[in-house]
Every structure is written in structure tokens, then in C-alpha cells.
């Protein structure tokens, strides 16, 4: 017997399953056989897979191209004898590696969280006696007993049930508890419809049952999910991929220019040692030492901003990734909806009424009011009293104890003015026939009430209740003929809206009836009405979906719920093409290639199994999409890990989902994703602004060195001065862009193409232009000072201050890469003003402090030199603003509109 390659247990009868597993439904296994099977199959736990060692994971943080650039910068600074600067640079490398290591360590908790989802204890039948054992001791063939409130300890083929309902949302995404039955089902039936099975990690919400263990540990359905989670690809984020490509290009360019500098100098007859130092100086100038630190700081600030809006980021690159998503795959229950079943429609005495309000707060009402309609009153009263559940708490803190569907009936009755305590006092409960999945109804016997001393209230499936009804109740309370055609037409209409429908009926019985019997319930009921309920969409989710559509982001619903329910919610949310739902059975028949073609035209995926969620994410990624996946259950963990960014629910989510995700929503609200996406786009904007600001400096420094070598001149700026410029301006000026407010219209842009280079040609042209301005201004003023008779130290100090001042004014240019700085407001970001003043103070120290003269070879300069530096900086500022104006005008003429709403 090998359960890892077993038949489809849900297709077999209970007796046949027991025969295959060599066990007895009445006796279970004996202790000796259970021990033998424990040795054969192992404990009922998920295997914890061995991963990389801590040291190996730390070293992997150092292989990123951007970090390699920093290492190269550190080696270069060591080569030129600047050990202090080398220590600073290499310190940044270690900090970045440590942050990455800690983030990765948190992610490794996903499998441990799945392991913890297995229940701690189970009630087991062995040798005809009942024992409570640790769930890890269960083996295939054991008979487990289930009670309300129990977590199912392993995958079970059910042997007996009494009103058993199981919440399988953590495994299937099904919004309502599943009513279990004993009949075998077809092989092709999806997991959510295997009503004869109970699966590990799901929760019994009502009733009792017993089942034989058919799978334990890794071969359970939750075990399969753990395996898929472990095997899901660890994807680089769009930002890290772009930075990696950008860094490789930058490294190649720096090495090429350094080699060119060395070659040209030696060909001109310069000594190899001098040219080596010149090449080193060019490399030092061209490497953007502050870029990794800036990326980390900008992302960290994005983390804090997102946290303030209800999104907790577990991995820094996820801050930016969400801003670049092109598709959001969202679970339905609890994310797009309120996860609170609510009566939306009531039909009584031939009249249909809509019900307002949502959740368990009883703040809504019934269209037209309850009035004096006896049939409506009795329908609501039946839903209130023929009920095993209750609502605890008040207002937004209200919660249900029991079945959410029954809680919705209580809320609807309260909205009509019925008081549960008063109704129970006036019509005391005498007997109950619990809901039975075979009978498909529940009944209660009450004293007093409508029309006589004894009253039977019945609620259940519309088909069963109608079959047992011989009449209907009119609005005035009279008994009238039952118009079955009209009721069935209403059932069809409500079903088309995705509503879950319950029918209500009553029966008067003599005063001496003291209990319910099958004969009393076999017929003679008076039909009173129908109640249709739905887990309604969050109002803010509707607005968020509309905002995503304006932003060019597709929203797709992936749920384990039924297609009719899913499409009804999709229509209310305003999803594109909500009527073309693709169900799990159809997905299973599609090849990966066919699925990749199909996903683009579908917005709703229903009755989807966990492995199919993973396939859907991969299919979208194969189309070049940047995918965000939301989820709350353990079944979502593989897809959350595979997605470019996984988003878990903080309130209702399982630990497995949270550990696999990159971002956690503290309010379980889809609208928070939209807010976080806006923050993410702002973060990406600020990163690009920093890159566009910092690279011209590095380019200009490299060009200055190259020009000096080409013309056989002494270096206008020394390598140690280049390090001063790069390290101080990055911290005092560049990092202030991290605090730049979001530009307007962020969510009116289409998502950026993940294959698009990090800088488009317009920005490349701008950085070349600014680099050339820095070359011309610094080299020109350097030569001007020498022509005026200044010594070389003074001229070099002027060149350094020219670089810094142009960088400072260019920082204001970069606050918007397309709009005029005057439209942004010169002083709307106080941090930039502070950074500019701090940089000015540092440059005054650099220029006039004797210590700085000794360390950096600087010298004091006069007021005339400062005026020339200021004029050069002002000219550079005007040139950049003119270039932006020319580009805006060209785009308008070309019909591209305002490029502020396009990709920067």
C-alpha cells in the first residue's frame, strides 16, 4: 500500500477505501499496525527542506552587479592609498549585504508556517477505543473523529457525517463552509467540490463526522502546496533586473574609458605609472559610489510611507515593484469583498425587495420597509430563529460564532426591526432538527408564535423546501396556492446574480406536539419566501479597481468560489469582461502555451485549485507581465512566492501566506494595494530622478580626466577630490530626492515596460548634455584661473566648487524630469533646500579650512571666482529648463500630450 501513488480517493466508496487501506470504520487500526505504518510512512508533518547555509546566503548578496561596482570602487581607492574612503565604500557594501541577508532570512519562514498549519491533536479510533493523540502520530488507515471547532488533522475520506460543514477557505478559497456528503464524486471534480473528503488544515465549523486517513504529511493537499512553495521560482524584481542591466553597462563603459585613458596617455609618451593613476582617477570619478546607498534609503522611505497607508513591506525592492505591476491577480473573499455574507434580496408574497447594508452591523434596511407584510415578517423570523449561529460584538467589531450564512439571516432580521432576544422569548425553542447535508434543510419547533401554540420553522435549499410545501403565505397572512413557476423564475433570477438562496417555510402543528419527527417534516409546509445573500464587494475596492484601470493595470479575480458568484461580484467591481469566467476544470485541460494565450482575455478565474493559481501567475509572466498576487490562505503561498510581488492579508491571512509574501496589508483591503501602488510609482520616480541627477557628475568627472589626458594636461581635479565630490554630494544633495513628494497624475500613467531600459534616450541625452556642461564649466574655469595667475591648487578648488554648485542647481532641475521647476515650486521640498545649504557649508569648509587643504589639496579662492562659479551654475540651470521646455513642446506637437503622465 503506497498512498503517494494512490487512486483518487474521492471517487471511491467509503467501504472500498477501508478495504484498500486494510482498516475498519468501526474499530480503526490496532496499536501494532499503527506503529508499523508510522515506520513506513513517517510522522504526519511537513518535511522541512534543507536550504543554503547562512554564510552562503550572505555571500550571495555580494554577487549583484551594483555591489560589484562598489567593491571595484573600494579596490580602486585602496590602490590610490585612500584607506579611509575605501573603508567607507566597503562599509556600504557590508550594510547592503546585511540588509539583503536579513530580508531573505525572513522569507525562509514560509515552509515553517505551512508546517505549523497542521493541527496539534486529533481524536482517533484505534482498536475500537477513542484516543486523543498528537496529529503527527496519525497514519494512513487511522479513523479520525471530527467535531465542531476541530482542525482536520490529515486528508480524510469521510465515513460518517452529521450536519458536517467545513471551512476550506485556507485551502480552496471557497467563501462559504462546504456541506459534506458521503457519496463518491467524479474523478474530474475539483478540490473545492470533493464533498466526500476533508483535508488537512481546514476547520470544522459545524456538525460531526468521522473519516479514514488517506494521506498524511507531505502527500496531503497542504503538503503539495508546501512542495510547490519550495519549488516556486525566486524572481528578481523589475527594479533589481533593471539595476543589474544598468550596472553591467555602466561597468563596461567605465572599464572601457579607463583602458582608453591609459592607452592614449602611454601612446602620447606619458609614463605608465602616471597613466595608471589617471585611469584610476577616471574610474573613481565614473563609479557612482552613492547609488546603492541612495537606492536603499529611497526604498526605506517608501516603506515608511506605505506603512502609513496600511501596507507593510517585508522586502525592500517590493516597494518599487508594486508601482510597476501591469496585472494584479486578486483573491475574492475578504480582499475584494467584505468576507461577511449579507442578505441582498428577499422575495415574499410575490414581491421582490432589495436589502441595503453590509456585514453584521444591522445598519441597513429593506426596500419599502417591512410594513405589515406577514409573509415577509415570517420569512425574516424563520431566518432569525431557525438558526444555530449568533453575532457577538458591536459595530465594526461584530463577529459571527457559527455559519456566516446564518449570521446574514440574523442581520437581515435585525435590519427589519426584529430583536433576537425578544423573538426567542415570545416563541421559545422546543426542539431542533439540525441541518443535514442529505436532507438539505434545518427545522425548529417553537411554542406560541404565528397562528397557534406550536410552530415549525424550516429553512433550506429552495428545491427541497418547495417540494415539501403545499401552499404559500400571502402578504396578509392568508394561506394561498403556491405559484411554483413564479417562485422558480425568481430563484433563477437571483441565482443569475450569484446569490446563495435559502427558502423559508412554516407549519402549524397541534399544541401537544413536543418534538420533531420525520413525518411532521415530510410535507404540508407553507412557503413564506426566499432570502438571497452574497459576500458584497468592498465599496473602496470598486474605486480601486477603477483607479487601476485608469492606470493601465489589469485586475483579475482568481477564486475557489463558484463561477456565478465570482462573475456577479466581478460585475459589481467593474472588472473587464466579467462574463467570460474560466473555471479550474477548463484550466486543467489547457497546455501551458494555450493557457498563456487564454489569460489575456479573461478577468475571472473560478473554482481554481492551488496549483492552478501558480500556473496562472506563470502564464501571465510568460506574456511579459509584472504580476502582483494577493492571497490569504496557505493555498495561495506558492503563487504569492512566484509572483513578482506577493501581497498577503494581515488580518485574515494565514502565517504561510504572510511568510511567502513581499507585502502584507494591515487592513485586508484591496484599496490599500492601489494606495501602495501609487507610493511605489513615486518611489520609482525618485530613484530615476536620483540616477538622472548623479550620472552626469560621474560622466563629467570622467570626461575631465579623459580631456586632460588627451590634451596632455595636468589633472584639473585630483582623484581624492573626486571622491570628496561623489561622497558628500550623494549624501547631502542626492538623497534629498528621496523625500520628493509624488508628482500629480502618477496613477494616470500606463505601467512601464519591464523590458524598457532604466533610462530612455531622452534622459540619456540629458545626462550627456549636463556632463558636457560640467566638463566645459569646470575645465574652462580651471584654465581661466590659471590664466589669471592663480596656482594649480586654487584652480583645482575652483573646478571642484564648479562641479558641486552645478550639481546643486541641477538637483532642483531633477525634482521633475519633464515639468518646469517653477510649476513644482522651488521650495516645496524643504529637504532639498536643507541639503543645498548643508552642501554649501561643507564646501566653505573644503575651501577655507587648513585641515581640508592638507587632506584634499584645496586652497582659498576669492569672491570673483565665486561669482564666475555662480554664473556657470545659473547658466547650467537655465539650459536644462530650456531643454525640458523644448521637449514638452515637441511632445505636444507630436500629439503625445503631457509627458509627465508617461514614462520618465
Image (spheres, rainbow, N blue to C red):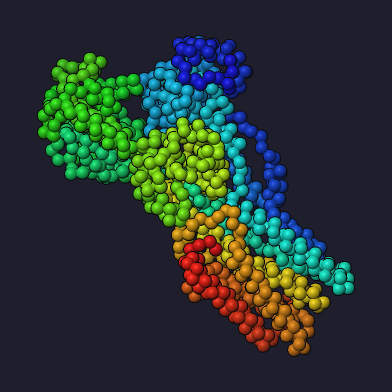
Depth check: give the residue in front, 629 or 55: 629
Tally of marks: 0
Q: Is residue 779 left or right of residue 338?
A: right
In the rendered image, residue 695, in percent from the top left (x then y), is placed at 65, 66
In the rendered image, residue 514, in percent from the top left (x then y), is placed at 20, 17
Depth check: give the residue in front, 60 or 485: 485
Rendered residue at 55%/30% (across/down): 224
Q: Is residue 457 left or right of residue 833?
A: left
Q: Quadrant of the C terminus?
A: bottom right
Q: Quadrant of residue 498?
A: top left
Q: Quadrant of the N terminus?
A: top right
Q: Is residue 640 visible?
A: no
Q: Is residue 698 visible?
A: yes
Q: Is residue 233 left or right of residue 176?
A: right
In the rendered image, residue 552, in percent from the top left (x then y), is placed at 46, 54
Q: Is residue 595 above or below residue 261?
A: above
Q: Is residue 31 left or right of residue 536?
A: right
Rendered residue at 22%/15% (across/down): 519
Rendered residue at 26%/44% (across/down): 356
Rendered residue at 47%/67% (across/down): 895
Depth check: give the residue in front, 48 or 257: 257
Q: Is residue 410 above or below residue 274?
A: above
Q: Is residue 302 above or below residue 725?
A: above
In the rendered image, residue 448, in percent from the top left (x then y), is placed at 15, 26
Depth check: give the residue in front, 598 or 136: 598
Residue lying furthest front: 894
Q: Quadrant of residue 54?
A: top right
Q: Is residue 455 above or below residue 824?
A: above
Amino acid at each position: 500500500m503506497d498512498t503517494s501513488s494512490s487512486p483518487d480517493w474521492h471517487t471511491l466508496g467509503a467501504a472500498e477505501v477501508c478495504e484498500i487501506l486494510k482498516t475498519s470504520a468501526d474499530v480503526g487500526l490496532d496499536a501494532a499496525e499503527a506503529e508499523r505504518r508510522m515506520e513506513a510512512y513517517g510522522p504526519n508533518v511537513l518535511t522541512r527542506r534543507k536550504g543554503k547555509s547562512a554564510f552562503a546566503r550572505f555571500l550571495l548578496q555580494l554577487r549583484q552587479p551594483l555591489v560589484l561596482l562598489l567593491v571595484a570602487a573600494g579596490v580602486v581607492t585602496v590602490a590610490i592609498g585612500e584607506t579611509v574612503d575605501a573603508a567607507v565604500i566597503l562599509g556600504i557594501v557590508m550594510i547592503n549585504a546585511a540588509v539583503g541577508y536579513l530580508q531573505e532570512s525572513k522569507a525562509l519562514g514560509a515552509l515553517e508556517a505551512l508546517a505549523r498549519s497542521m493541527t496539534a491533536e486529533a481524536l482517533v479510533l484505534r482498536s475500537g477505543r477513542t484516543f486523543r493523540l498528537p496529529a503527527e502520530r496519525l497514519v494512513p488507515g487511522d479513523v479520525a473523529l471530527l467535531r465542531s471547532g476541530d482542525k482536520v488533522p490529515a486528508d480524510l475520506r469521510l465515513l460518517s457525517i452529521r450536519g458536517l460543514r467545513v471551512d476550506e477557505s485556507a485551502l480552496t478559497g471557497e467563501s462559504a463552509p462546504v456541506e459534506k456528503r458521503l457519496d463518491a464524486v467524479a474523478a474530474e471534480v475539483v478540490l473545492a467540490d470533493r464533498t466526500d473528503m476533508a483535508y488537512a488544515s481546514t476547520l470544522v465549523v459545524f456538525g460531526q463526522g468521522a473519516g479514514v486517513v488517506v494521506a498524511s504529511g507531505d502527500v496531503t493537499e497542504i503538503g503539495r502546496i508546501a512542495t510547490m512553495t519550495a519549488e516556486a521560482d525566486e524572481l528578481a524584481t523589475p527594479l533589481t533586473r533593471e539595476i543589474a542591466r544598468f550596472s553591467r553597462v555602466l561597468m563596461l563603459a567605465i572599464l572601457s574609458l579607463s583602458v582608453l585613458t591609459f592607452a592614449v596617455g602611454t601612446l602620447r609618451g606619458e609614463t605608465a605609472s602616471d597613466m595608471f593613476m589617471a585611469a584610476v582617477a577616471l574610474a573613481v570619478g565614473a563609479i557612482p559610489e552613492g547609488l546603492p546607498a541612495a537606492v536603499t534609503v529611497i526604498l526605506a522611505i517608501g516603506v515608511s510611507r506605505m506603512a502609513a497607508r496600511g501596507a507593510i513591506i517585508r522586502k525592500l525592492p517590493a516597494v518599487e515593484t508594486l508601482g510597476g505591476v501591469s496585472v494584479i491577480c486578486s483573491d475574492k473573499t475578504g480582499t475584494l469583498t467584505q468576507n461577511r455574507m449579507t442578505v441582498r434580496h428577499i422575495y415574499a408574497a410575490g414581491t421582490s425587495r432589495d436589502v441595503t447594508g453590509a456585514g453584521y452591523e444591522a445598519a441597513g434596511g429593506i426596500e419599502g420597509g417591512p410594513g405589515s407584510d406577514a409573509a415577509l415578517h415570517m420569512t425574516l423570523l424563520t431566518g432569525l430563529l431557525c438558526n444555530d449561529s449568533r453575532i457577538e460584538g458591536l459595530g465594526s467589531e461584530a463577529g459571527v460564532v457559527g455559519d456566516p450564512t446564518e449570521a446574514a439571516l440574523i442581520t437581515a432580521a435585525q435590519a427589519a426591526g426584529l430583536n433576537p432576544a425578544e423573538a426567542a422569548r415570545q416563541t421559545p425553542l422546543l426542539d431542533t432538527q439540525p441541518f443535514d447535508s442529505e436532507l438539505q434543510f434545518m427545522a425548529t419547533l417553537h411554542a406560541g408564535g404565528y397562528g397557534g401554540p406550536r410552530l415549525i420553522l424550516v429553512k433550506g435549499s429552495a428545491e427541497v423546501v418547495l417540494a415539501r410545501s403545499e401552499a404559500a403565505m400571502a402578504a396578509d397572512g392568508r394561506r394561498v396556492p403556491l405559484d411554483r413557476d413564479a417562485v422558480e423564475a425568481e430563484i433563477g433570477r437571483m441565482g443569475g446574480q450569484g446569490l446563495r438562496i435559502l427558502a423559508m417555510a412554516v407549519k402549524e402543528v397541534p399544541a401537544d406536539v413536543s418534538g420533531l419527527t420525520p413525518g411532521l417534516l415530510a410535507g404540508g409546509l407553507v412557503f413564506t419566501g426566499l432570502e438571497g445573500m452574497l459576500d458584497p464587494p468592498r465599496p473602496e475596492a470598486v474605486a480601486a479597481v477603477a483607479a487601476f484601470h485608469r492606470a493601465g493595470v489589469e485586475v483579475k479575480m482568481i477564486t475557489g468560489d463558484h463561477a456565478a458568484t465570482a462573475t456577479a461580484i466581478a460585475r459589481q467591481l467593474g472588472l473587464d469582461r466579467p462574463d467570460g469566467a474560466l473555471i479550474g476544470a477548463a484550466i486543467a485541460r489547457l497546455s501551458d502555451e494555450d493557457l498563456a494565450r487564454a489569460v489575456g482575455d479573461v478577468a475571472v478565474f473560478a473554482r481554481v485549485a492551488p496549483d492552478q493559481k501558480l500556473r496562472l501567475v506563470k502564464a501571465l509572466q510568460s506574456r511579459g507581465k509584472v504580476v502582483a498576487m494577493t492571497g490569504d490562505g496557505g493555498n495561495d503561498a506558492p503563487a504569492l512566492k512566484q509572483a513578482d510581488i506577493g501581497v498577503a492579508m494581515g488580518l485574515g491571512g494565514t502565517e504561510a501566506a504572510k511568510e511567502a509574501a513581499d507585502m502584507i496589508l494591515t487592513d485586508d483591503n484591496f484599496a490599500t494595494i492601489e494606495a501602495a501602488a501609487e507610493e511605489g510609482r513615486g518611489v520609482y520616480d525618485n530613484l530615476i530622478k536620483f540616477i538622472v541627477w548623479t550620472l552626469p557628475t560621474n560622466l563629467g568627472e570622467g570626461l575631465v580626466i579623459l580631456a586632460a589626458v588627451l590634451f596632455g594636461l595636468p589633472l584639473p581635479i585630483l582623484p581624492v577630490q573626486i571622491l570628496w565630490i561623489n561622497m558628500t554630494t550623494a549624501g547631502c544633495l542626492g538623497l534629498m530626492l528621496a523625500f520628493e513628494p509624488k508628482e500629480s497624475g502618477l496613477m494616470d500613467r500606463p505601467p512601464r515596460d519591464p523590458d524598457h531600459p532604466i533610462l530612455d534616450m531622452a534622459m540619456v541625452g540629458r545626462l550627456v548634455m549636463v556632463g558636457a556642461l560640467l566638463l566645459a564649466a569646470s575645465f574652462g574655469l580651471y584654465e581661466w584661473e590659471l590664466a589669471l595667475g592663480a596656482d594649480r591648487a586654487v584652480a583645482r578648488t575652483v573646478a571642484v566648487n564648479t562641479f558641486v554648485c552645478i550639481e546643486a542647481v541641477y538637483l532642483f532641475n531633477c525634482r521633475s524630469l519633464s515639468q518646469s521647476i517653477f510649476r513644482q515650486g522651488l521650495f516645496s521640498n524643504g529637504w532639498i533646500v536643507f541639503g543645498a545649504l548643508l552642501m554649501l557649508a561643507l564646501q566653505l569648509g573644503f575651501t577655507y579650512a587648513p585641515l581640508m587643504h592638507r587632506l584634499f589639496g584645496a586652497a582659498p579662492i576669492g569672491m570673483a571666482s565665486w561669482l564666475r562659479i555662480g554664473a556657470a551654475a545659473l547658466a547650467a540651470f537655465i539650459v536644462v529648463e530650456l531643454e525640458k521646455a523644448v521637449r514638452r513642446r515637441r511632445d505636444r506637437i507630436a500629439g503625445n500630450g503631457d509627458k509627465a503622465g508617461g514614462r520618465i
